Amino acid sequence: MTELNKTAEWAALASHWSEVEPLQMRDLFRENPERSEQMSIRQCGILLDYSKNRATQKTLNLLLGLANAADVDGWRRRMFAGERINNTENRAVLHVALRNRSNRPIWFDGEDVMPGVNEALNKMESFSNDVRSGQWKGFTGKAITDVVNIGIGGSNLGPLMACEALKHYQDPKLRLHFVSNVDSTHLLETVKGLNPETTLFIVASKTFTTQETLTNALTARAWLLDTLTDEKAVARHFVAVSTNAEQVTKFGIDTDNMFEFWDWVGGRYSLWSAIGLPIAIAIGMSGFYEMLQGAHEMDEHFLHADLSENMPVIMALLGIWYVDFAQARTQAILPYDQYLRYLPDYLQQADMESNGKRVTRFGRPVEYATGPVIWGTAGTDGQHAFYQLIHQGTQMIPCDFIIPINSHNESGDHQQILFANCLAQTEALMKGKTRKEARQEMEAAGLDAEQIVDLLPHKIFPGNKPTNTLLIDRVTPGRLGSLIALYEHKIFVQGAIWRVNSFDQWGVELGKQLAGVILEELLDEEKSNSHDASTQGLISYYRHHRKK
Ligand code: F6P
């Protein structure tokens, strides 16, 4: 198979970049009044305006040529058909089945997975109803007031992000907390002030072998038993979400209190499964179903729409355009909504753990850049922190601006100010400010000639910075579901084109292995000193100062 970067489609794009590089978006808008209309897609309650990109119709055609050559159509069909496309773990990738609200059969190894999916949803529904209504009692007969999710990575970020995003729909009497970091401060600060009699812990771990989660869960158990003293209390205050019944039992949680999912659900794609239990408890199962429905609508769009009108595909292709042909190395996710403040963190794992790969799915080193660094923050805060670099720094940073038109918390003119700021940024990034405009502005402000000469270079904005704008009506469970599914499929398409396996994460293993070795050595001075001088020196320093 020809290397991706040796294909005709790749070569055409590489030479096309030299045609596009000198073009100014402000000229493209002037030359084509239809540009915004032509470069927008409306789907699943989301308006994607991708017209503020350094791309022409020819660019899109060439990118679509690349997608066709990569058989994106075949890949999307294979994923939905339950093929084992996660080749290094020999697993299917079927998070779409978890939100398949049409309930049409989805086959995996000759078996329809939908009855199992529906059964798991029913169990979640009945449990979340019981907790919400107060029917589920703690060991001393009191209703639950606080739910603490203990998990990390995909077993934390999804529910954390969604519970925050949908806080408006929560019953304030039931508080949700999230503990992920193995730093005991995280757990102990979280449980400070909580009443063990009314606290429920959800231990969420796909593998149920993750050191951080198990360490936190054991400490939480000890905290609980410190007050409730009887081991039997654990059954009323601990439930588990996992694929590993054996380890759950070993830990001491009754499998009756276990919510199962399957190895064909990747950790970072798991908030649609029982890993979403905190979301169901927070907003009720009807809200959770709405979220699944929104994601399902995006799945249908992704699976059936022509690639040229396909929202995830277009976003994926523009991403590849910048990473591989314009050498952009990062991408900012900028939600203009406080409720979406954890979305950049969530997408960071979704994207970077999926496409942060250096070999193809066949094990050959890639000869081109793959996943970019994903980062960002919510609302106008970023404007007063890092936007300077996006406007006038030396790197190209493509940005996604995401904003609802309506706020759940309308108050005075806050929403208009927020919206105006969001659009102003995308406009400023696109248009920039020319030398002439900057000079005129300073002249109008009465600056003298010498001051103008000195300040002019600083006042010029090169502009031509690419952005997508995504508008939604409001942050609802349904729209959140569509939005997350949009990014999941974007990541999938990019992985298919880059020829990487987006569903494994071997890169996190080495650190875990070495942590195990170092842990033993921190505790025992007799253990071998097999490290490099730096690591060994740091271990000795630690031992010495811990003793003191
Ligand atoms: O960091 C690696 C990872 O395996 C992630 O992919 C996963 O989301 C996280 O650890 C947690 O894993 P688990 O749910 O098995 O505890």
Image (cartoon, grey):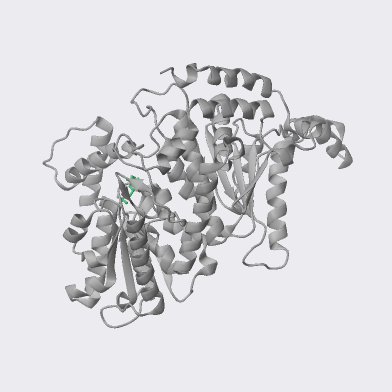
Q: Quadrant of the N terminus?
A: top left
Q: Is residue 186 visible?
A: yes
The image shows a total of numbered marks equal to 0
Q: Give the side of residue 194 with respect to residue 546, left or right.
A: right
At a point 46% along the width and 63% down the height, the residue shown is 288
Residue 156: where, in percent of width, then height? 38, 55
The relative height of residue 264 versus residue 362 in the rendered view (above or below) is below
Q: Residue at x 21, y 57 (%)?
A: 245
Q: Position of residue 292 (x, y in %)?
A: 47, 57
At 59% from the left edge and 31% from the top edge, which residue is drawn? 395
On the question of residue 266 being in view, the answer is: no
**For the point 54% across and 36% down, which residue is it?**
316
- State the residue in front, 26 or 193: 26
Q: Residue furthest bottom?
A: 141
462 to 300, vertically: above or below:
above
Residue 238 x, y percent position in the rendering = 27, 68
Q: Which residue occupies the foreground of this view, 162 or 296?
A: 296
- Determine which quarter of the picture holds residue 274: bottom left
Towards the viewer: 360 or 418: 360
- Percent across and percent down for residue 301 are 55, 46
> Compared with residue 105, is residue 172 higher up or lower down, i.e. above or below?
below
In the image, 506: left or right of 429? Answer: left
